[in-house]
Amino acid sequence: MITKEVLLAAQKLWDYHHLDQLPVKSDCILVLGSHDLRVADRGADLYLQGWAPILIFSGGLGNLTRDLWTEPEADQFARIALDKGVPAEAIFIENQSTNTGENILFTQRLLKEKGLDPQSFLLVQKPYMERRSFATFARHWPEKQLIVTSPGIPFEEYPNKEISMEKVINIMVGDLQRIKIYPEKGFQIFQEIPADVWDAYERLIGWGFTQHLAS
């Protein structure tokens, strides 16, 4: 049940996951695929506003989309960008990755194949995955300059008919667990988790928001 107490605890996680970084002129916009097509809109808008000359979409079918879609995330995202007026020659597609680490590693491979070596990136992701995406990128590509951004949607307005509030909270709980345990596995850089955020996480676990936890 989504109670007032649940929403207050979930807001703590949302605020922690969200980095509040502002876009800067960069060499490349890298949009990480997901089940949220609004991320594609954000990436396309950044390109059309002139923040970078290259737009990369990365994502195959991952944990949240393999049971929803048959078409890779990156292909769907690219089509949205084309429909918004982004020229095809500015778009690059990596559609094999299945998780955030592969998003970075497979994008590195794509850029090498294309003979491109951007030094600065605007990384576009869902609001509640900004911090984990930053930590993953920094682990696998530490020499690059990075700003992370997402659709500018507040927590209470984020759920829609495709993505319920319950699903958002479950994903945020799972992502916080990964921020805690993935550095020791070599997947991410270490990120400090404030005590009040961890307390909110534990309360959400106690209330049953456990569907997205890593095994």
Image (spheres, rainbow, N blue to C red):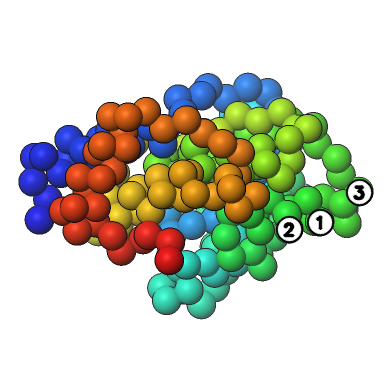
Q: Nearer the viewer, residue 184 or 87?
A: 184
Q: Earlier in the sequence, mark 3 or mark 1?
A: 1
Checking the image for residue 106, the label placed there is 2
At x 37%, y 60%, the residue is 213
Q: Position of residue 113 (x, y in %)?
A: 88, 56
In the visual, does 183 lie left or right of 171?
A: right
**What residue occupies the far right of the structure in this picture?**
115
- The quarter of the picture where the N terminus appears is bottom left
* Picture residue at 66% right of the left edge, 30% below the top: 146
Q: In this view, does 38 lie to the left or right of 134?
A: left
Q: Viewer-nearest of labels 3 and 2?
A: 2
Q: Looking at numbered disc 2 in the image, what kind of residue is underneath it?
A: Phe
Q: Which residue in the structure is indicated by mark 3?
A: 115
- The residue at the point 54 percent across, 63 percent down is 73
Whole-angstrom CA distance, mark 3 to mark 1, is 10 Å
Please report contact status of discs 1 and 2: CB closer than 8 Å, yes or no.
yes
Amino acid at pointer 3: Gly
Element marked by disc 2: helix
Q: Residue 37 carries which label?
A: none
Residue 23: name its quadrant: top right
In front of the other: 165 or 136: 136
Q: Who is closer to the viewer here, 93 or 212?
A: 212
Residue type beneath disc 1: Arg
Image coords of residue 215 (percent x, y): 43, 66
Query: Who comes first in sequence, dot 3 or dot 2?
Result: 2
Residue 137 visible in this rendered orientation of the protein: yes
Q: Residue at x 51, y 33 (%)?
A: 191
Q: SS of the residue at dot 3?
A: loop
The circle drawn on residue 109 is 1
* Quarter residue 158 falls in: top left
- Please state the horizontal and vertical placement of residue 13, each as a whole percent of the image: 32, 38
